[in-house]
């Protein structure tokens, strides 16, 4: 089971413009502080968002699909705060599998840049 596959919301489109929206977790989270929403985050998240958009999906859907592609992962705790978010995230299961090229791009722009799959 994967905890926080959307990185406390960082792998959604909420922070792509570099601001912290009202009511966002980064405003009052003990685990996510506003200082992580820096230029490096915006560059990496923007590149991942571009991959997602080329696939016709959201950044959150891409992150969930990337997480759930692992055979050892049986579930992911997403912490949806609305039925819209839940429905939107479940749609990640409807997209075609990630290609080797897409996985390489994701590895290159991912948070750790480990290159591992």
Image (spheres, grey):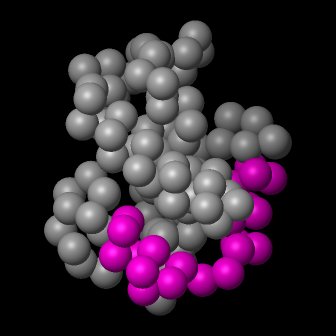
Residue 99 is inside the magenta segment: yes
Q: How many marks?
A: 0
Q: How far across and down, in percent of the image, does residue 78 sit?
A: 57, 51
Q: Does residue 70 appear in this view? A: no
Residue at (53, 74) in percent of width and height: 68
Q: Is 115 in front, or is 88?
A: 115
Residue 84 is inside the magenta segment: no
Vertical comparison of 108 with 44: above or below: below
Q: How far across and down, in percent of the image, does residue 95 sit?
A: 70, 74
Residue at (30, 68) in percent of width and height: 107
Vertical comparison of 24 with 103: above or below: above
Which residues are the magenta region? 86-106
The answer to whether 107 appears left or right of 68 in the picture is: left
- Which part of the image, by quadrant, shows the C terminus? bottom left
Residue at (81, 42) in percent of width and height: 83
Residue at (18, 68) in percent of width and height: 114
Which residue occupies the extreme top position in the image? 22
Q: Is 14 in front, or is 73?
A: 14
Q: How far across and down, in percent of the image, does residue 5 sit?
A: 46, 56
The answer to whether 14 appears left or right of 110 in the picture is: right
Q: Does residue 46 appear in this view? A: yes
Q: How far across and down, in percent of the image, does residue 106 sit?
A: 38, 66
Query: Magenta span: helix, strand or loop, mainly?
Result: helix
Vertical comparison of 87 with 65: above or below: above
The answer to whether 107 appears left or right of 75 in the picture is: left
Residue 113 found in image quarter: bottom left
């Amino acid at each position: 089971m994967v905890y926080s596959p959307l990185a406390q919301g960082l792998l959604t489109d909420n922070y792509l413009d570099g601001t912290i929206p009202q009511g966002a977790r980064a405003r009052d989270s003990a685990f996510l502080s506003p200082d992580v929403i820096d230029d490096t985050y915006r560059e990496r998240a923007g590149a991942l968002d571009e991959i997602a958009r080329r696939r016709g999906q959201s950044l959150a859907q891409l992150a969930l699909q990337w997480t759930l592609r692992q055979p050892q992962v049986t579930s992911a705790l997403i912490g949806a705060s609305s039925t819209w978010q839940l429905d939107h995230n479940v749609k990640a299961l409807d997209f075609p599998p990630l290609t080797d090229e897409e996985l390489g791009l994701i590895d290159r722009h991912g948070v750790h840049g480990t290159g591992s799959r």
